Amino acid sequence: MIAKEFEYRRPTTLAEATQTLAEHPGLAMILAGGTDLVAWLRDDVIAPDLVVDIKDIPDLSEIKVVDDELHIGSLVTFTDLIESETIHEHVPLLAEMSETVASPGIRNRATMVGNICSAVPSCDAGPVLLVYDTTVHLTGPNGDRSVDINDWFTGLRETALTDDEVVTHLTLKLRKHGGVYVKLMRYAGEDLAQAAVGIAAYPDNEYRVAFGAVAPTPIRSARIENTLHGNELDDDLVARTVAMVPDEISPITDMRATAAYRTHMTAVMLKRGLWAARQRLDGTGPAYGARLV
């Protein structure tokens, strides 16, 4: 039950949406999939005066490749990513991550852009998008702008998005790579991440490594990446990077896991994930979607 009343509008253009947001600074919330928003309204976490539903705005549901970039619209759901041939051809890691998100009913509505806009520490899309050259594209009353994914998460449930802006789409630079998303849950099925690791292995021994649910925001580890860079993966190198994990993350203890357990399992997931990402780059290894923990 939602106790607080609010105004509801459903614009049909981006200009109308951003103008509406600008007229209600700090008092309006955007509705796309609504899976986080409705839960927060129900639990009285937020109390907006206005909800702006953007689902009628055209061209926000596209998945397409333009030159060497993948474009993903802000209304693309996790189910869309799972079912997209384009995603499976170019970035199967996005489908692997999407299959771990909640339940089929949630995946049918929840959007990947909404996931990173909610910016909870355990958001599944965060660690995966951080290992790509991802750009977040926004529009507002003052025009369009772009934000590098590394600058997107600014704090707990905080992002670079301003009150009068709408995210239109994401772009990912396409390069040959092997990726992996390893998610620790209390049980198989519908659960938030206790800890998560996203990894991309590129040619010439270049690696991207990101973590979720073990800090106030999803984070990349430059120290681990620099240690891996240019070196052939072997047991000694993996052991050295795994030993860095406790200094790279800052997990908490809560009802879902202790900080010590999260730290231990993040190290285990990093070890398994590095080998899986490298093998996938080489065309071998576990199939995308295979569970590693």
Image (tube, grey):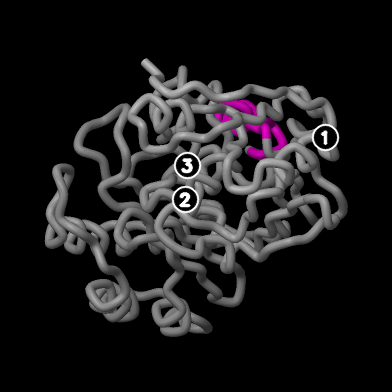
Q: Nearer the viewer, residue 8 or 71?
A: 8
Q: Quadrant of the C terminus?
A: top left
Which numbered mark, 2 or 3, is in the foreground of this view? 2
Range of residues picked out in magenta = 75-87
First in sequence, mark 2 or 1: give its number.
Answer: 1
Work out how far the residue at label 2 is from the one at label 1, CA to CA, in angstroms.
25 Å
Q: Position of residue 240 (x, y in %)?
A: 28, 81
| Residue 97, label in figure | 3
> What's the residue at 69%, 24% (across, down)?
9
Q: Are marks 2 and 1 in contact (CB under 8 Å)?
A: no
Query: Which image quarter: residue 250?
Result: bottom left
Under circle 3, the secondary element is helix
Q: Position of residue 77 (x, y in %)?
A: 60, 30
| Residue 16, label in figure | 1
First in sequence, mark 3 or 1: give its number.
Answer: 1
Q: Quadrant of the N terminus?
A: top left
> What's the residue at 82%, 32% (across, down)?
59
Residues packed near mark 2 inside 10 Å, few (<14), some (14 to 19) or many (20 plus): many
Residue type highlighted by circle 3: Met
